[in-house]
Image (cartoon, rainbow, N blue to C red):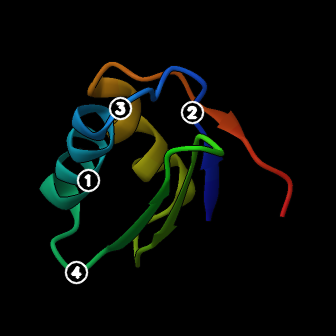
Amino acid sequence: MQFTIPDMTCGGCSNSIRKAVASIDLGATVQVDLAAKTVDVQSALSEAQVAAAIEAAGFHIEKSAQ
């Protein structure tokens, strides 16, 4: 699943997002493209669960076209 996160602006932001996803799924793979402001997540959890964790960390999500 891929998310666009317009307010992700730095390495600290990407680390916060990685931690948020890991807090609900330790086995998740998170790839961040800071320049494109996108996050790709491979997880057994639903898209809604992952999105909720990222939003709970304080980030606004826009669903990306795949």
Assign a secondary structure to mark 3. loop
Give the answer, above or below, for where 1 lies relative to 28. Answer: above
Which comes sooner in the sequence, label 1 or label 2? 2
Assign a secondary structure to mark 1. helix
**Residue denoted by label 3:** 10
Q: What residue sits 52% from the left and 47% below the top?
A: 48
Which comes sooner in the sequence, label 2 or label 3? 2
Nearer-the-camera pick, 28 or 7? 7
**Residue denoted by label 4:** 27
1 with respect to 21 (left or right)? right
Which comes sooner in the sequence, label 3 or label 1? 3
Q: Furthest-right residue in view?
A: 65
Give the CA distance from mark 4 to mark 2.
Answer: 22 Å
The three-letter code of the residue at mark 1 reads Arg
Q: What residue sits 45% from the left and 29% below the top?
A: 8
**Residue denoted by label 1:** 18
Q: What residue sits 86% from the left and 54% below the top?
A: 65
The three-letter code of the residue at mark 3 reads Cys
Nearer-the-camera pick, 25 or 64? 64
Which comes sooner in the sequence, label 1 or label 4? 1
**Residue denoted by label 2:** 5
Instruction: Count residues near mark 2 (Cα–Cα under 10 Å), then give few for <14, some for 14-19, many for 20+.
Output: many
Give the CA distance from mark 1 to mark 2.
Answer: 13 Å
Nearer-the-camera pick, 35 or 25? 35
